[in-house]
Amino acid sequence: MKKLFNKIIAGIKDNKHPILTAGGVLIALLILVNVVYYFVSAYSPGCVVCHYMKPYYDQSMNSVHKDISCVTCHPSRRILTAPYLLRYLAGSYNPRPRAEVDDDICLKCHESQNLKKETAFEMNISFNHADHLSDLKRGKKLRCTSCHARGEEQHFTINKNVCFTCHFKGAVRGHSVTKCNVCHGIPRKIVEHGGFKFNHDSYLKIGVDCSQCHLDVTKGDADVPKKKCYQCHVERTEEYNNIDKIHKVHINEQGVDCEECHNSIEHGKIKMISTLEANCENCHQFRHTAQRELYIGSEGRGVESIPSRMFAAQVSCEGCHLDINNDGKSDMSERKEACVKCHTKGYDLMLDKWVSSMDEAVNDVAPSLEHARQLINIAEQRGKNVDAEKTFFSDAETNFNLVKDGKGVHNVDYALKLLENVSNNIEGIAASLGEKNYRVKRSKLLTNDKEYCNLCHFAIETKDIEKFGEDKFPHKKHMEIITCTKCHSKSEHKKITVTKEVCESCHKNFSKIPNYINYKGIKFPHILHSSTKGIECTVCHTSLDFSKIRIKSDACTSCHHKEKDLRKNCAACHSAQNNMYNGTILGEKLDPDIMNSSGVVCEDCHLADKNVISRPSKNVCESCHDASYTGMKTDWIKEVKDKSNTISSLIGNIAYNKLGEEGKSKISYAKKLVSLIKTDGSGGIHNYMVLSSLLDKSIKELKGLSTDEK
């Protein structure tokens, strides 16, 4: 071996010039080939000379990138062509290399596009590139080529299978990982299914999940079977379950397309629910069409679709129409038992109320429908064009028959909407034909929100709620004084709609209980009469609006006039009356009432009767004086009232804007005097002499102003 090696070395030394020459020629030839290929490879047709890629080349030539050479996007080592040529000639070169495209390469051309802008995809699906490229999706980093992969006909067409793999793999049946409305939004179109038209929005309002009708939305599982690994690797499945690492290596580092590993998955209306799982009409031809239409909540005219909550829960006909007795019939007792079977005790009573209330609502409207028919016939006989009225009547009759024949209990919400529509149409027809004041008789169910809520809640125990948010809120107390819809939505069950403004409409200015308020001239210690002292607000205020007062006549006297000690200091509450009696009138100190000067106190006239101090009778004066005083009190009150009315009449006839300051001052004083008499409440009896004199003086001054004006 050593001799052979030495012999070869010696031969090279002896022929070194020819060998070096041949080597130099070979290197020069390789460089020339490399230079030629460097320029030739800039053109896409040159790629198919060595690579098995004609289908992809054809795709590229038919795509929007047809004018862009392959090497612009795909990484290549064009300067090192010679070594690869030698490998190719030696048969050790892989003619199917991976063709990666980095995001940076895409963005060199597409950076001018606003990737944050919402883009419309198929079916107007809103898509945001920046959102998908910047954030991890399900813990995976996406690339441009994750979605814009090799299509069947064009390079970089969107591969929807990738979208479906990401959005649906691992989701439960009928659902997506990201929720349906992320792509589809809220459906707004009227759709038809099983012969019925309805609006998705109506179903979504009551919480119907998409999967309750769209049973299967995918076909396929997008799994990765182990045998897929063997296409590239030999016995390298030890990391098969390390999903994060596999995605990092294959997507982030190697740019492998998702579909190369994942099985396909389809998305669409794979399987829809039947309109009613139990088709009663298989046996009873056209016997229950109205019931079914009402139950599904469709086919009404001029009223949006409202599915029954039972239909939304996929309850079929026999779910309620039980045949426990096996007699081929379903009587009321069996139906009520069905209610209890699924719900609780009390729901059987609810069904009775539904039936009776809906029957009442239908029977109340029925006569008006016939009345509208007669109005149209009479008008038509007189030659009037009633085409529009006939159209409205046709809608009303259709809706009425749908409720009547379909039985309102199958869908109470929808039935009530239909009856309201019927009533409105009839009233519109009547108004058009000359009866503008005609009103349809509507049952309490249509006019009273509380009656509507009680359809169910009379049988359902109300929750004992004491707080709403951070505020004290006695729910049961509010139920007694306001309607449910004051706080809750009527159209969306359980939804709370009350706002701060609604609360303040009742509780206005009572966030902090005032210490004192002025009530009819009385300095009223409000803080001492609040609920903190055991006195409910509704003793003095109306139950619906706490800014209004409805105090009863004996509300004060039942406490304050009960004991003698509480009677002694009348002025503490009745300061206006006390000032009048003492002669303090509108800030002036005048003569006290003649009775006051004689030492007569309040209780002498306001006689106590069974611990209640009452107003004096009209003949109270003669009890201390003689018969000549009979009727004096009545005469004085009438005189003061007449003079007060005279002042009001005079003021109404005076042009106030034309008066000077003195004239305006006189009118202001007259108004205050009349107001004070009303506040006092005695009709002038507490100081008749002084008040009569002041009224006379004021009347004279006002007449003078009226004369000056003329």
Image (spheres, rainbow, N blue to C red):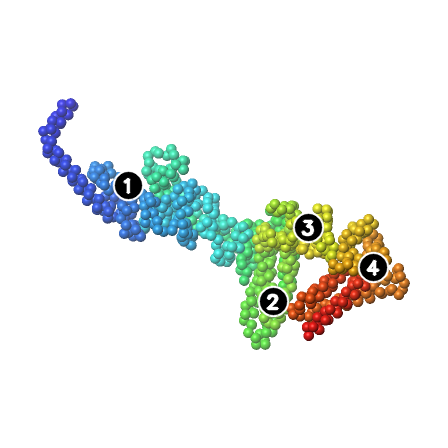
- Direction bottom: furthest residue: 383
Question: N-terminal of the two: label 1 or label 4?
Answer: 1
- Residue wearing tag 1: 97
- Residue wearing tag 2: 427
* Badge 4 amino acid: Pro
Question: N-terminal of the two: label 3 or label 1?
Answer: 1
Q: How many numbered discs, if any?
A: 4
* Quadrant housing residue 53: top left
Q: Residue placed at 36% from the left, 49% from the top? A: 158
Relative to 436, is 40 on the left or the right?
Answer: left
* Badge 1 amino acid: Pro
Q: Residues within 10 Å of mark 2 (few under 14, many from 20)?
A: many
Name the image quarter holding the C terminus.
Answer: bottom right
Mark 1 → mark 4, Cα distance in angstroms: 115 Å
- Residue wearing tag 3: 514
Kindly state the secondary structure of the residue where label 3 is placed.
loop
* Badge 3 amino acid: Pro
